[in-house]
Image (cartoon, rainbow, N blue to C red):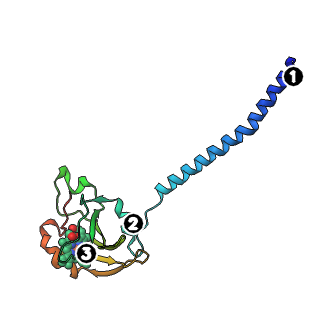
Amino acid sequence: MNSKKTGKIYLNYLFMIAVVFIPCFVITSCVEEKQLDDIVQQTDAPAVALPGLPDDTAGYDKWLKINAEPIPPVAGGDPHNGTKNVYVNQERETIAPDGEQQFPYPDGSIVVKEAVRPNKDYIGLIAIMRKKAGSDPDHNDWEFIEYTRNSPDDEFSILARDGTCWGCHARVEDKDYVFTEID
Ligand code: HEC
């Protein structure tokens, strides 16, 4: 084989490599980029409130959870019947500087308690306390409201508010009306 012919064969090989591999490489990197875009989009997606709940509760389950372990139903009658978690839209350092919880909660605090009803596997109750300066000085400016639903596809609707809640929560007036302390 003369060198001219060998050169031509090499050129053919190079051409094949270019035709086959370059598009493959381009397609693969595009796909990877798209997957990355999807992931970024998912993590950047704005949190949406559960159906029927106010917008300011969106993403509450990413807030500071103040109980370390789920709170079990209270035997013999539970005011918020179910297995519960309590979240607050504050930093740990703000409400418990140096690990010591301080009261009262700052203005603008929102405490959200979720409960999974006994023998159910979805959140059926959301109880909210919102601290709004000047709204109710007799009850440390907390607004109380509770929502429930009876199926995971239902919207939440208001069950009770303020007056229904004060009597019981006043038992912990010294802890700014909040039973659950930070763990
Ligand atoms: C009969 C007593 C009682 C009544 C009435 C009551 N609660 Fe509670 N609530 C509790 C207890 C006890 C806890 C903490 C332990 C638990 O959830 O089991 C609690 C916890 C909460 C929490 C989580 C923060 C915390 O205090 O630990 C929120 C929020 C809350 N209740 C909102 C409400 C709202 C809103 C109402 C009225 C619609 C209400 N509660 C009525 C007894 C009561």
**Quadrant position of the N terminus in the picture:** top right
Which amino acid type corresponds to the residue marked 2 in the rendered image? Ala
Specify few, some or many for label 1: CA neighbours under 10 Å numbering under 14, 14-19, or 20 or more: few
Task: Kindly state the secondary structure of the residue where label 1 is placed.
Answer: helix
Say left or right for 18 vs 83. right
- Residue toward you, 42 or 4: 4
The Cα–Cα distance between marks 1 and 2, rounded to whole angstroms, is 71 Å
Q: Quadrant of residue 53?
A: bottom left
N-term mark: 1 or 2: 1
- Residue position marked by numbered label 2 in the rendering: 58
The image position of residue 77, as x and y in percent, is: 19, 78
- Residue position marked by numbered label 3 in the rendering: 81
The Cα–Cα distance between marks 2 and 3, rounded to whole angstroms, is 23 Å
N-term mark: 2 or 3: 2
Say left or right for 77 vs 28. left
- Residue position marked by numbered label 1 in the rendering: 5
Q: Which residue is at a point 33% across and 78% down the rendered structure image?
A: 148
Q: Which residue is at a point 36% across and 70% down the rendered structure image?
A: 121
Q: Is residue 161 visible?
A: yes
Q: Which residue is at a point 51% across and 55% down the rendered structure image?
A: 41
Task: Kindly state the secondary structure of the residue where label 3 is placed.
Answer: loop
Say left or right for 32 vs 166. right
Q: Is residue 138 visible?
A: no
